[in-house]
Image: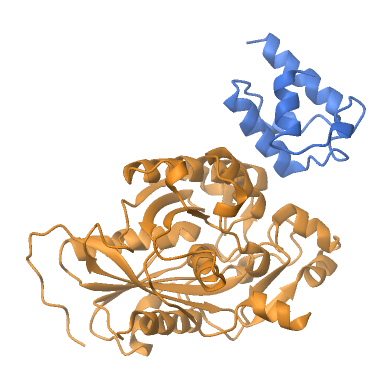
Amino acid sequence: MNPMLKDILSGHLQVGEQSLHPEVSLEDAGLDSLAIAELDLLLAEHGVTIGEDRLASVTTVGALAQLVDEHLVGR
Amino acid sequence: MTAPVLDSSPAPAAVVLCGLGTAEADTIVSNSEVGGRLGVPADWITSRTGITQRICASAGTSTADLAVRAAAAALESAGKRDADVVIVATATPDHRMPATAPAVAARLGLTGIAAFDIAAACTGLLYALQVAHGFIACAAAQRALVIAVDRLSHLTDPEDPVTAPLFGDGAAALVVRRGHADEPGALGGVLLGADGRYADTLVVPHGKFMRMQGQKVFQHAVTRMSQAAEQAAAAAGWSVRDVDRFVPHQANARITAAVGRRLGFDGSRVLENISLLGNTSAASIPFALAHAARGGALHPGHRVLLAAFGAGLTWGATTLTWPDVPCVTDRPDPSHRLEAAR
């Protein structure tokens, strides 16, 4: 997982280390729709502009990490 | 009551807080009750909003009823039952016409002076304070009674899980007077903004219930309150480290936490009481101030930063050094009621 995303999830959004695995669902990781909205803001502060609608389309930590990686590559 | 004599003094006038009163709605509604209606667990509401209960006005309690109670408390706090202008900030006026303020002023015995409403939703208090500042700065008033009051629980769909758990009803009033910028209680610059491009993110159409796009409101609230707070603090010559108490509009505890994190506040400096009252809209900031002052978390001399956000979209922020002012409420604090019930 990208270190920046890992820092955001485990820091600001207080996702436990045990949930930072690809197969864990965002719901089980405690990331509800408001957390996704905040994640979108935090990523934008780091120059990664995805949009909460696109973020809300992924369902697992692994898919989230892949989506962020795709945007980082595309910058 | 006669209109005030215009004062042509050239001295720059500041607006100084000299009275604070609150009036909570009568009924406490628990998360169990709301959750049962919505078919969601009570703790889902708590985790989603930080709210454990909300105060709701009965159908027979008008906006003016709440406003009069809070205003009477604020005038008692100020030690003088007098004002030159009455401004009511509300999104829930009792009538489309006339405004609520003249009726409130009359019930307080303040007839003959200017009285009018301001509609800026949850940011209404700060908009009203800026207008009061204008009255005082141009010497049209020496004292202003500013009342923030809403009954938003009556505009939510009881079956909508997004909005039904959020809102409480209540009123808070401030008395501000002409004074000097270096006095405790003097407001710093009031920074205000609005952006109607996003009006449909939080709207109550005519004859319908409130509609809210939760994620978008969350993002705008966090971004706008953070920016406004930073600008208001900078205008006062403060850094975040200088602020003793940060008081954001109590919209949702998740928004409060996100704004606090973004600005770099540790939790102890951020005042929060949404858990007991719900989102009381324009009244939420003075409710939080009064709650903290009574509970010992806010002292005279504390440097206080206020930030609000609401439908419109609207937002604002200002600063003050907390004055030695008594906070008067005509009902026990809900936390006291909660303690008593345990």
Residue B176 image point, x, y percent: 31, 70
In the rendered image of this protein, does residue B338 appear above or below residue B178? below
| Occupied quadrant, residue A65 | top right
Residue B205 image point, x, y percent: 56, 59
Q: Which chain is orange?
A: B
Q: Nearer the viewer, residue B257 or B158?
A: B257
Colour of chain A, in one word, is blue
Q: Nearer the viewer, residue A53 or A61?
A: A61
Residue at 71% across / 77% down in the picture? B338
Residue A45 image point, x, y percent: 58, 27
Which residue is the extreme one toward the right?
Answer: A23
Q: Is residue B150 visible?
A: no
Left of A45 or right of it: where is B186? left
| Occupied quadrant, residue B250 | bottom right
Left of B5 or right of it: where is B179? right
In the rendered image of this protein, does residue B153 appear above or below residue B316? below
Q: Nearer the viewer, residue A74 or B24?
A: B24
| Occupied quadrant, residue B173 | bottom left
In the rendered image of this protein, does residue B81 appear above or below residue A51? below
Residue at 43% across / 58% down in the picture? B302
Residue A32 image point, x, y percent: 78, 43
Residue at 46% across / 42% down in the picture? B240
